[in-house]
Amino acid sequence: MRQYRRTAAVLSAVFMGLGQLYNRQYAKGIAFIVFYATALFYAFTKLEHAIWGIVTLGETKQHFEVVGKITKKVPGDHSIFLMIQGLITIFVVILAVYLFIMNIRDAYQGGKLREEGKPLNGIGATLKFIADKKFPHLIITIPLVFVFFFSVLPILFSVLIAFTNYNNTHEPPGQLVDWQGFRAFKDLLGLSQWAHTFLGVFSWTMLWAVLSTFTTFFGGFAVALLVQQRNIRFKSFFRAIYMIPFAIPAFLSLLIMRNLFNAEFGPINSMLLKFGIEGPQWLSDPVWAKVTIVIVNLWLGFPISMLLIIGILTTIPRDLYEAAEVDGASAFYKFRKITFPSVMFSLAPIVIGQFAGNINNFNVIYLMSGGGPVNSEYQFAGHTDILITWLYSLSITNGRYNFAAVVSIFLFLIIAGFAILSFRRTRSFREDDMLR
Amino acid sequence: MSAYRFRKGLWLVISYILLILIAIFTIYPALWIVFSSFREGTSLFSETLIPEKWTLVHYKELFEQFEFGKWYVNSLKISLITMVLSVLFQLLSGYAFSRFRFKSRKSIMSGLFVIGLFPSFLSLTAVYVLLLNMKLLNTHTALIMVSSAGAAVGYLLVKGYFDTIPKSLEEAAIIDGASNWGVFFRILLPLSRPLIVYMAVTTFAGTFSEFIFAQTVLRTEAKQTLAVGLYNMVSAQFSTQFTIFAAGSVLVSIPVVLIFIIFQRLLVEGLTSGADKG
């Protein structure tokens, strides 16, 4: 018996596709050869430059040269572009190497089939096999490619930035960026003003997440209980009104609220003035600004909790309550022992999810107060800035990209902790084949 | 007994008072903005909630002084295309994870979940450079790509929903010769109407409100979206266009609120099914 499999595998290792040709899978073989040639060409022309780029982040600055009588600007290396292009190139090469290994395996298995005297798939059969048996791979490829380019790659990029000195004094194209290890981490936690800002903003972030989650959840809970009482009429009318904050686009509501709480001209303070009360500086006093934001968030967020809880209330069996009434349970007792546990049982993962979401609630803070009022003890942060808005002003407004990247890594770790906690609890991940 | 009845009656009255107070709390900002849009002058300040003199001039100014119509079309276009793409991506990945078992399925699922936790605009700079390299800055394509790209990350909701649909239905269809696509379009999708409506409406509203990426990617006024345009009207320290902004807000809110009212039942169903099965 001939050793088809070894010959095929070796041929494919020498040049991708040869093994397939040897196995008489011509269309596949040619396709592989074309792919391999392109990949080799790509690797030879790009890979070295990419690795050089990502290791050195560029060597020549933008500078001026005198040509004859005029000075000309000579563009230097753009560190950030080099980094991203390098990342892309390296990934493409890794993917190609993976395909190359798969090609050897394919040739090996083709050879094995021949040894056993079984027929090999022609190109038509191969395609049909992919459409049929590889269907799940086929349908998630496009979504995954998008996720890769617009999420994974940018995330890797921002993680890498944390280890560089990319900030407003090292900003391409004028300047080069260099690797500097953990310096940014040490600076952020070691320099007293930065550490002070970080701790201050961090503790307000956590306080904000707790307060906003708590108020919207229990606010929504209370409203749901009020509306769903047996002898209340016009239930659907009230419910429809309470849905309004959920329906109006959030950015508009926030912009409207910002004006509503305007201390000088806003209607709330002018109304208070009519009663002879001087209204507070809603958004420019440090403490009031926080209170205002929590109130506005309650307005925005309670409808969702209310809708969710109403949905669950209707599923609690009536006889539970009736049994409790026979035993003479008070209304509060029934709530504590029946209603509350049932709601929490279904909603706990969602509440944890909302908590994680609130840590990152950019829109509410940014559109309401923009992080203000300014805190002179902080670096580029105001009293109501949470980590994510601080991050925004650090990077986009003030160009401290490396510090922003460090903060984002911290933020990610915090959220990941909470979210994995909730994810573990969700049935849809744990279960799998038990249902049905 | 009468004391009991009295207490019950009193509680009912208190309940109604509370309900009405909450209703005022919820509806006041909306009413205020509607009335402001009909008020004369441009300032934020007014003596009364209901305007003394009514005018429609701000609605006219909206189209004369700003490219409001264009922003509207831009926003609708971007949000609709993003909505279709994201819902499709989510449904497809949910289908793959719910109905098929394949190698590295679990690791892809966990990977996607973790990626979804990373605050999206942290990657703003990288996305900007990427778009610059692809020569897509200041195009709507860029914004659509950026906003629908991460959609697969939200597969969990769909997967949870599909998991509860009994497999016996599909098995019967497969015996009758249905393909994978047939199962997807003829069986799973029709059974997931509330979920699809919920995802579509929330994606639409989310993209409609999206602000940071739109501001970064779209540079010229003619390309802008409603969110950016309206924000610029009132973001200045002393905004003098408040009533025009109010008119714009009303025009933006009406269609969105209508969609919510029309789909109210399906939305609530989708929301709670996500909670139940998530």
Image (cartoon, coloured by chain):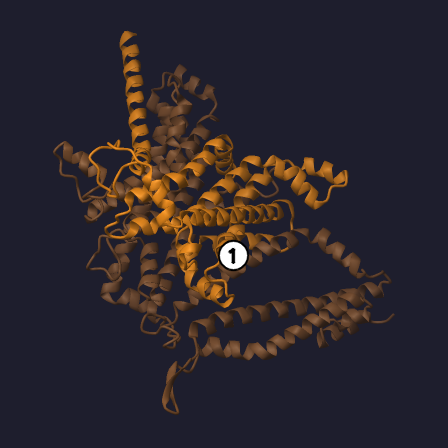
Chain colours: A brown, B orange
**Picture coordinates of residue A56, whole percent (x, y):** 44, 79
Q: Quadrant of residue B192?
A: top right
Residue A386 visible at all: yes
Near mark 1 (Cα within 10 A), the count class, few <14, some 14-19 or many ≥20, is some
> Mark 1, chain letter?
B
Residue furthest out toward the bottom: A68
Which quarter of the rendering shows the N terminus of chain B?
Answer: top left
**Picture coordinates of residue B159, whole percent (x, y):** 57, 43
Residue furthest out toward the left: A276
Q: Secondary structure at mark 1?
A: helix
Query: Left of B81 or right of it: where is A308?
Result: left
**Picture coordinates of residue A393, whole percent (x, y):** 31, 59
Counting labels gives: 1
Query: Left of A51 or right of it: where is A354?
Result: left
Residue furthest out toward the top: B2
Q: Amino acid at mark 1?
A: Thr
**Picture coordinates of residue B75, whole percent (x, y):** 46, 48
Residue A206 visible at all: no
Give A28 or B102, whichever is nearer the viewer.
Answer: A28
> Which residue does the image show at 68% across and 45% down from the upper left?
B181
Query: Left of A8 or right of it: where is A171?
Result: left
> Which residue does the image show at 27% across and 49% down from the upper left?
A369
Give A169 or A158, whichever is nearer the viewer.
Answer: A169
Q: Quadrant of residue A10?
A: bottom right
Give B190 or A337, whichever is nearer the viewer.
Answer: B190
> Which residue does the image show at 37% across and 38% down from the upper left?
B250
Q: Which residue in the structure is indicated by mark 1? A: B141
A300 is higher (above) or lower (below) than A394: above
Give B265 or B39, whichever is nearer the viewer.
Answer: B39
